[in-house]
Amino acid sequence: MIGAMKYALFLLVPLAASCGLVQPKPDRPGAVDASAPAGPFAGTRPQARPGTEAAAMDAPADVVEAAQPAAATPPASGRLGTTVASLGNAAEPGMWIKTPLVRQAGTGTITYPETGRSVEAQLIPLDGPPTAGSRVSLAAMQELGAPLTGLPELVVSR
């Protein structure tokens, strides 16, 4: 009895698994596909909420431009801002910081307020919003006295 049930189980499992593989063919050419949505909601699509980015995609370009606030441009020199930093690639030598606070590479100063130490470093642009974090070289982190495994807040200046 149990032996027969085992054989039945071995036959029924593959049979049940293959049910989704068999697709009926339409009787006549041009027949409606059963998997296509039908009924009163067939062409209905969700609409974006007003004021969202998706809603702005449907608006004319002049309306979108008028609705967007002017982008804040960081100053060319002086204090660029504060950033949360992490240790960058330790294999890359030198004093550098990859940060979204700059748009062009150049030389600047990194300050760690907790120790009061500053270092001159290469400022390398990093894609992302200005509020995104930065990556700092091992040499710069050590010179600043910042924790290598922490996320110190650094002040970036030109």
Image (cartoon, rainbow, N blue to C red):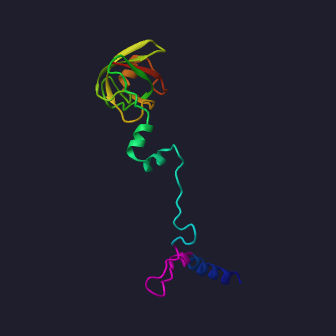
Q: Of residues 40 and 108, which is closer to you in this image? A: 40
Which quarter of the picture shows residue 120? Answer: top left
Magenta highlight on residue 32: yes
Q: Residue at x 44, y 82 (%)?
A: 30
The N terminus: image quadrant: bottom right
**What is the total number of numbered labels drawn onto the structure image?**
0
For the C terminus, the quadrant is top left
Point out residue 50 in the picture as x, y percentages from the top left corner: 53, 46
Residue 68 percent location from the top left of the image: 43, 37
Residue 13 to residue 122: above or below: below
State the predominant SS element of the stretch in magenta. Answer: loop
Closer-to-camera residue (105/88): 105
Residue 4 locus on image (x, y percent)? 66, 84
Q: Is residue 27 above or below residue 140?
A: below
Q: State the residue at coordinates (44%, 21%).
A: 154
Q: Quadrant of residue 108?
A: top left
Q: Residue furthest top?
A: 116
Nearest to the observer: residue 158 or residue 120? 158
**Region of the chain picked out in magenta, as a range:** 17-35
* As drawn, 25 above or below 49: below
58 is within the stretch colored magenta: no
Q: Position of residue 43 (x, y in %)?
A: 51, 66
Q: Residue furthest right?
A: 1
Residue 38 in the image: above or below residue 86:
below
Q: 147 left or right of 2?
A: left
Q: Toward the viewer: 61 or 127?
A: 61
What residue is drawn where x is 43% and y is 48%?
Answer: 57
